[in-house]
Every structure is written in structure tokens, then in C-alpha cells.
Amino acid sequence: MTLRFEVDDEDFSLAGRASSELKRALGRLGICPETVRRASIAMYEAEINMVIHAGGGVAEAVIGEGRVVMTLSDEGPGIPDMALAMTEGWSTAPDRFRELGFGAGMGLPNMRRNCDEFDIRSEVGKGTCVRMVINL
Amino acid sequence: MSGDSFPAPHSVLLDPEKCVGCTTCIKQCPTEAIRVRKGRASIQPERCIDCGECIRTCPHGAKRAVSDPLSMIGAYRVKVAVPAPTLYTQYDEGCSVDRVLSGLLELGFDEVFEVAEAAEIVTQATRELLSLSGTEADLPRPLISSACPAVVRLVQLRFPSLIPNLAPLIPPMEAAARIVKERLHPGEEGVGVFFITPCAGKVTVTRAPLGYARSAIDGVIGLRDIYLPLRSAIASAPERRLARAGRKGLEWARVDGECDAVGERRSISVDGIGNVIGVLEALENGKLEDLAYIEALACPAGCVGGPLTVENPYIAKTRLRNREESAPLAGPSPGEGRYGPAIDLRWTAAVKPRSALALDPDMLKALVMLEEIELRAEGLPGLDCGSCGAPSCRALAEDIARGTAIESDCVFKLRDKVRELAKELMALEEIRPPGLDREAKG
């Protein structure tokens, strides 16, 4: 089954909705708590990233037999240097987000750490697409 | 998922005479455990966490806690009252803690032991847990206080991945009861320990303990039930010096108190079940990992806001603060010493996840049901009016998938169907059997 969310442009009060709904769905499926936690962290970080850097986008979670595939795509500015972006502590988040406690440069590394498969494609000026798989 | 979903005993009951079948409680329940059926609210035991929100919010007083009557103390040779510090806040500051405790003796108790005094010992144990580090501690951070039983049950049901974060310590009331039984009256027969409680959750936890096998508490008396008789007893009782607890123990009855007492700066204190859920969500999303300790209390303002209290939570909280100021920082000799060797405060039984929210033990079946729920939820009006007896359209969709409700339970869906039927009737009415209709032949 597919859960689909429009992630709103810079609206922090709504960021986290996709991860909450995903968590709820996985809980209803009786998935082991630790796996649910990993999925919700990965989804949450990805959502926040999309709000901070890309002005929103679309989050999708496809829950199937044995795995959940999360795909987040945006039409934001893209990531010029992927290796740098994947470095812990590296952040390009604007100050106004850092003041809120976001943008510590742990988003992408955290996402990768919590997934079984992690794939990120980005093109400057076009956007970014993150695909994360967690085995259930 | 491993774990048990047995319908644990609960302490929140419905009075069918008083329930009018309105939708107030179903909307407030944090675990969506209540449905209105046949004009009466009914609680699903496997989902109830005994937080008492329904007792607090029912406008008709139809929800109550099943506690023990004061008369039950008569069955014991030595009757020991173990009052929660919240009790002191129900009477104004003109009435000293000594007088409140003296009133309890006047009511027929032989001894009193303050839960606040035990809270000082639990404070010390919590500090020790927090000072352990790394693998030595084997506990993740932040630790979540397990003093509020509704929070522990909430974690079991909605945040099972956070079970390892629960501080593995028995709550102060249980510590108090154990001191009475194991240190003050070791091996004695006929000693009855009676906890005076501000909430239903603590009634339940003495019957179905969390983290330990058996409670040392023999009976639980609701604060609401003892309030009036105690008030009369206080008026006539000779005042005796009985209060021993210090500020660090009293503080536990209000929000921030535990954190203040424990003295951990990297901590957060949160009160009210909705706010607790918000903080636990954030923690589960990996947001609060820099914290060492979370004090989470289901009731507004903390235990002083318990559903079995009489006084307004915020008035009670201020009274508590005033009492804290006139109390010594700590009691005469909390912890070891006064009662011999320290009692064991650590959990001895596992707290397991509760799987009541899962749709089916078979994941594939659950997945099919989940798809059905998504589809059905989209087809419902989304007003969350509650007329169907479920708290939200999504909850109704889930009930339909679980087979406990039907789509026509939704008044809007029902209306649509009636309308369709009416249209069909009208259309049928237009048709005349050719054999009877002369005009039709033309």
C-alpha cells in the first residue's frame, strides 16, 4: 500500500506528519518497535530536509511484503557536492532554521544510518530524490 | 511483534445510569479506546492505559475509578496509611501536613508513612542511574521517569520502541509500602498498607504491577472518597508531629518537581497526556537524544491534577510550592540508615510492548486491512463528528476493517444511501406496468 504526502513549504507545524502517519501504519501492521523507530527517524529527517532546503516536495511510503520503500522528491536547488553533504556535521541550513535547533548537519547521515538501502540523486537546479528502504 | 495484549485489569469504570452516550470522552481518549455503543460509552480494555482523561472530562460524572472503601482497613490488625503528597494540597496551608496526617490517625489508621519520604529515596536511586555511564549503565538516554503508570502504559501501547528508556525503578508509593512491610514490620502478620491515590492509574498498577511481580499495597483509597471524612477528622484530631518528608519528596506531586529533586540539568518535564505524546513522538523521531532525563506526567500540573483530586490542579500546585518552602530540603535521614538496609528499588519483571493496536498477527492480512482502512477513510466525510460512536472517521474506517462497525454507522453515509434509495423509489414510481397503463399505449 502507498501513503503519499505533500510536504508543505517551510511549514514546521506540519513537518513530521508523514513520519507520524508512517509510524501509525507500521504500528498497525505489528512491525517490531525498533524497525518502526528507524523508519520514523529516517522519514522525519528527510521531511525536515525537504522543508529546510527545497521548499517542500512529495513524500511517499510504499509498504509491501517484507519492506517499506520511502521516496522523497523535491524540485529544490539540488546538492552540488554530495560527498560533502553526506559528511556528519556539514550543513547549509539557513540561520533561521539553525536558531530553531535544526541544521546540525546530521540529517543525511542519520537517514543513511537508519536504512537498509539508501540512495540519493540530485541535480543542481532541478531537485533531489531520496530513496530509502527498510526491511520489515 | 512479541508482547502480550491480555486485557489487563482496569480501574476506570462506566456508570451506565449516568452516561448519556455523548461523544466527549471518545474524543479525549489518547489511545482511542472508547466507543459509544447502544447509547453508552464502552472502554476497550486492551487499549485503556488508565490515564483517567475520561474521568476528568466526562460532563456527567459517568466515569469513575474503582478504588477500595475506607471500611476495608478494618480487616487488618495494623492499619498503615500511605498518602500521596497530593493529599496535602487538597487542604489550604493553614492546615499543616502534621494535621493532615493526624487526621488520618483519627480516621482509624494506626500509622502513617509518607509517599513523599519514599520519593526522596527514589530520587536518590534515579540520580544513581543517571550517574552511571556508557555500557556500565546499559540504559539508553534519555531515561523516561516511570513514576506515572499511565505514561508507562502509554509507552507500552504507542511507543514500544521507547520501553528500554523507561527508568527501571519502582514508583515512590510502592517503595513506601515496601519500607512499611519489609523494614518497619518485617515478617508481621495482619499489616495492611493503604495508599491514598490522586488517580486511577495508581489503583490499577497495584493490581497489575509494571516492572515488578506483586505490590506490597493492600488497598487503594481514592483521594476524592477520603476528602470529606478526613476534613472532619482533621478538625477534631489532636495535632501530632508526624511529617518527616522534605522538599525533595514533596516536589514529586507537581510537574518539574522530579527534575528539580533529581537535579539533572539536561532534562525536560512535561505534563498532560497530549503534551507527553508530543514529547515522546519527538524522542522517537530522534530529536531529543541530548537529554538525560524526561519527567513525564499524564495529568495537567502533575499528580496534583489527578482525576481523583478535589482541588483545582493549579491551586493545588501553588499550595504545594508553599508547603515545599516551609519544609526542610530533605527529610531527617532518607535512604539507608533509618530503616536498616536499603530496599530494592529496581524492576524485577520485564515491561513488555502491548500489541493491541496491531490489526492482525499476520502481517499480510494486516496489510490488506490497512489498505482497506485507507480507502474507506477517504470515502468518509472527514468531519470527525463522533456520531458513529468512534472518535474520528479514520477510527471508524479501522473499526469497519476490524469488523466491529459498518459503513452505515456514519450518519452521512446513511443519508447518502437513503437518498439513493429515495431516488430509486421515485424512479420506480414513474414506471407503470404496460398492461395497466392505457395512456402508455398511445
Image (cartoon, coloured by chain):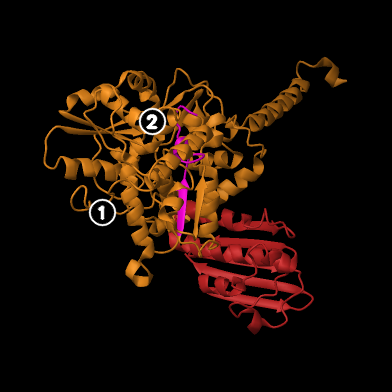
User: Bounds of the magenta span?
Assistant: B293-311
Residue A45 to residue B28: above or below: below
Rounded to the nearest whole Å, what is the CA distance between mark 1 and mark 2?
Answer: 37 Å
- What is the crowding at mark 2: few (fewer than 14 residues within 10 Å), some, or many (at least 20)? some
| Residues beneath discs 1 and 2 located on the same chain | yes
Q: In the rendering, what colour is chain B?
A: orange
Residue at x-position 35% and y-position 48%: B330
**Residue under pointer 2:** B96
Work out which quarter of the rendered image holds the N terminus of chain B and state it: bottom left
* Mark closer to the observer (1, 2): 2
Is residue B249 shown in magenta? no
Left or right placement of residue B101 versus residue A19 in this view: left
- Which x, y percent locates residue B233? 32, 20
Identified by mark 2, the residue type is: Ser
Q: Are marks 1 and 2 in contact (CB under 8 Å)?
A: no
Supply the letter of whichever chain is red: A
Q: Nearer the viewer, residue B303 or A50?
A: B303
Q: Is residue B3 visible?
A: no
**Residue under pointer 1:** B348
Asked where in the image residue B431 lies, by quadrant, the reply is top right
- Mark 1 or mark 2: whose residue is earlier in sequence: 2
Residue B88 to residue A15: above or below: above
Please, what secondary structure does the residue beneath circle 2 have?
loop
